[in-house]
Amino acid sequence: MLERFVWPKNPKYNNSNADETVDHVLRNARVPLFCTIDDNVSDDFKFNGKLGPMKQLFIRSYGHWVTLNNLMNFDSITIGVDGSRLSVPDLFSFLRHWRTGGSPPIDVSIPAF
């Protein structure tokens, strides 16, 4: 089991398999401390699995694929998502879900639009 996982964006490398790679990492990486994903995926990318448990999850720069359902299925104490397409009603739905015990305790949720 990895303790930490960081997948940086490499501007010199165009990953044509990024969707498949990110999906594989999200489904199979068991990382108890923190996971950071900074690579880009296509606009059509979707992830429908569960992620975690872990202490920190950061999806940097290319978090356009994160949905309300993803947020509810991420088992992480700290969640940071940059470039999200989540709406304000989505965030309110997530907060209601979280307050009723539907998600693990969260210290920080930082969706950046």
Image: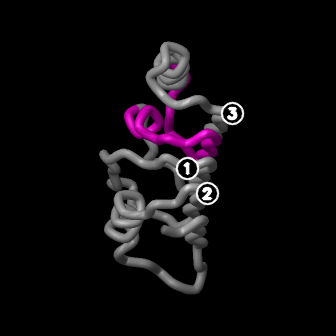
The x, y position of residue 23, in whole percent, is 35, 61
Q: CA distance from mark 1 to mark 3?
A: 12 Å
- The residue indicated by pointer 2 is 34
The x, y position of residue 86, in whole percent, is 50, 34
- State which tag comes first along the sequence, 1 or 3: 1
Answer with left or right where residue 69 lies relative to residue 7: left
> What kind of residue is marked 1?
Met
Crowd tier of the residue under label 2, counting other residues whose Cα lies within 10 Å: few below 14, some 14–19, many 20 or above: many
Depicted 46 relative to depicted 101: above or below: below
Answer with left or right where residue 66 lies relative to residue 113: left
Magenta residues span 69-89
Nearest the camera: 106 or 85? 106
Answer with left or right where residue 93 lies relative to residue 38: left
Residue 27: quarter of image: bottom left
> What kind of residue is marked 3?
Asp
> What kind of residue is marked 2?
Phe
The x, y position of residue 65, in whole percent, is 43, 48
Tag 3, which secondary structure? loop
- The residue indicated by pointer 3 is 107
- State which tag comes first along the sequence, 2 or 3: 2
| Residue 54: numbered disc | 1
Tag 1, which secondary structure? strand
86 falls in the magenta region:
yes
Q: CA distance from mark 2 to mark 1?
A: 6 Å
Depicted 12 relative to depicted 38: above or below: below
Nearest the camera: 7 or 2? 2
Taking the spot 37% from the left edge, 63% from the top edge, the residue there is 28
Depicted 49 relative to depicted 6: above or below: above
The x, y position of residue 37, in whole percent, is 55, 62
- State which tag comes first along the sequence, 2 or 1: 2
**Number of numbered discs on residues:** 3
Crowd tier of the residue under label 1, counting other residues whose Cα lies within 10 Å: few below 14, some 14–19, many 20 or above: many
